[in-house]
Image: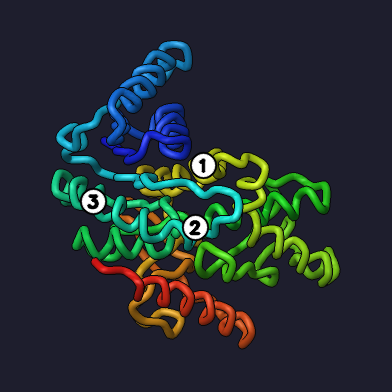
Amino acid sequence: MKITVIGAGNVGATAAQRLADKELANEVVLVDVVEGMPQGKGLDMYEATPVEGMDTRVIGTNSYDDTANSDIIVITAGIARKPGMSRDDLQSTNAGIVKSVTEQAAAKSPNAILIVVSNPLDVMTYVAWKVSGFPRHRVMGMAGVLDSARFRTFISMELKVSVEDVSAFVLGGHGDSMVPLPRYSTVAGIPLPDLMDQATIDRLVKRTRDGGIEIVNFLKTGSAYYAPSSAAVQMVEAIVKDKKRILPCAVWLQGEYGMNDVVVGVPIKIGKKGMEEIIQIKLTADEQAALNKSAADVKANMAKLNI
C-alpha cells in the first residue's frame, strides 16, 4: 500500500504522521512545492519510526514522480483561513492549486482513490473529480467526518460523558449551511432530544457550524489541523482495511436525495473500492429543505469556477 499526501503544511504533515503511526501503508509520500520542507518533515517522521516501532517508510519530495502508483492520495494543498475569512473566500486561490496538483497526481496514479481536504471542501472535491476524470466512487471529500467529530465533542462536553458513547451526524456542505441532525445523534443509543432541551441543541449546532472559525480566531495565523487530519485518516483506514464504515463524506450526487450534479456531504459506505454505496436516510421536510439550501450554496460557488 502506497499513500501520497499532497501539501506538507500542518494538515498534510499531521496526516502523514498519523498514517505512519497507524502503519496504514508501506510507504507514505509527502509532496509539496516548497523545496526542502517535505524532505525535512518526511525524514524527521522516518527517524521516529524506530522509536515508535513502526515499519512505514516516509518520503518527502517536490516531484510527483515519487508519487507514482499510489493507492490513495490525500489532497490538503492550499492556503489556510485567517480571522475574518470564510471557507468560500479561499475558493479562487485554492481551486487553481487543487486543479494543478490533481492533474499531476492523477497522471502518475490513474487508479488511485482521492480524498480531498482543501477548503472550500465541497467545491474543491468537485474540482478534483472534474480534473481527474476519475469515477465518482474514487473521489471523496472529508467534511462530515470532521463536522460530526466536532458535534460529538461538544455533546460530550455538555453532558460530561465519554466521547466514545456519542454518535452524531452532520450532512450538507462544509460551511455555514452544514446540516447537523440531532434526530440521528445519540448518546449510548439515547436520542439527543431526550437528553437536552432544544435551546441547548441549537447552541451546540451553532458551535458545530462555527467550529472551524472558532479555532481560526484562537490561532490567528492558521486553521485547525489535528482534527481534520484525524478525520481524513479515518477515511483512509476504512479504505485500506476495507472496513465498510458508514461515514458522512462529500461526494458527487446523481439523483440521491433528489439532487443532481453537485457535491454534498451525505452518509456513504467506505471500503477498498472507495465509496461503495450512498446511504439514503429519511429526512423530515425541514431537514431536506436545509440540505437543499446547503447544496444550492455549493452549486452557486461551483458556478464561479472556470475549469
Residue under label 2, please give it. Answer: 143
Q: Is label 1 in a helix, a strand or a loop?
A: helix
- Counting from the top left corner in percent of width and height, residue 53 is at 44, 16
- Kindly identify the residue that appears in the image at 18 percent across and 47 percent down: 104
Residue 6 lies, with reference to residue 153, above or below; the image says above
Please indicate, yes or no, whether residue 59 appears anywhere in the rendered image: no
Density class for disc 2 (Cα within 10 Å; few <14, some 14-19, many ≥20) is many
Mark 3 or mark 2, earlier in chain: 3
Q: Which type of secondary structure does the marked residue at label 2 adopt?
A: loop
Q: What residue do we see at 82% from left, 68% from top?
A: 194
In percent of the image, x 38 and y 47: which residue is there? 78
Q: Report which residue position mark 3 lands on.
A: 100
Q: Tell me which numbered mark, 3 or 1, is placed earlier along the sequence.
A: 3
Q: Within 10 Å of the Cα at label 3, are there few (<14), some (14-19), or many (20+) other Cα atoms?
A: few
Label 3 and label 1: CA atoms lie apart by 25 Å
In the image, residue 219 above or below residue 113: above
Q: Position of residue 294 (x, y in %)?
A: 52, 75
Q: Is residue 129 above or below residue 214?
A: below
Q: Nearer the viewer, residue 197 or 224?
A: 224
Q: Quadrant of the N terminus?
A: top left
Residue labelled with disc 1:
230
Residue 25 is tagged as none
Q: Determine the image quadrant of residue 273.
A: bottom left
Q: Is residue 2 above or below residue 60?
A: below
For the residue labelled by badge 3, is the local secondary structure a helix, a strand or a loop? helix
91 left or right of 1? right
Q: CA distance from mark 1 to mark 2?
A: 12 Å
Three-letter code for the amino acid on which mark 1 is drawn: Ser
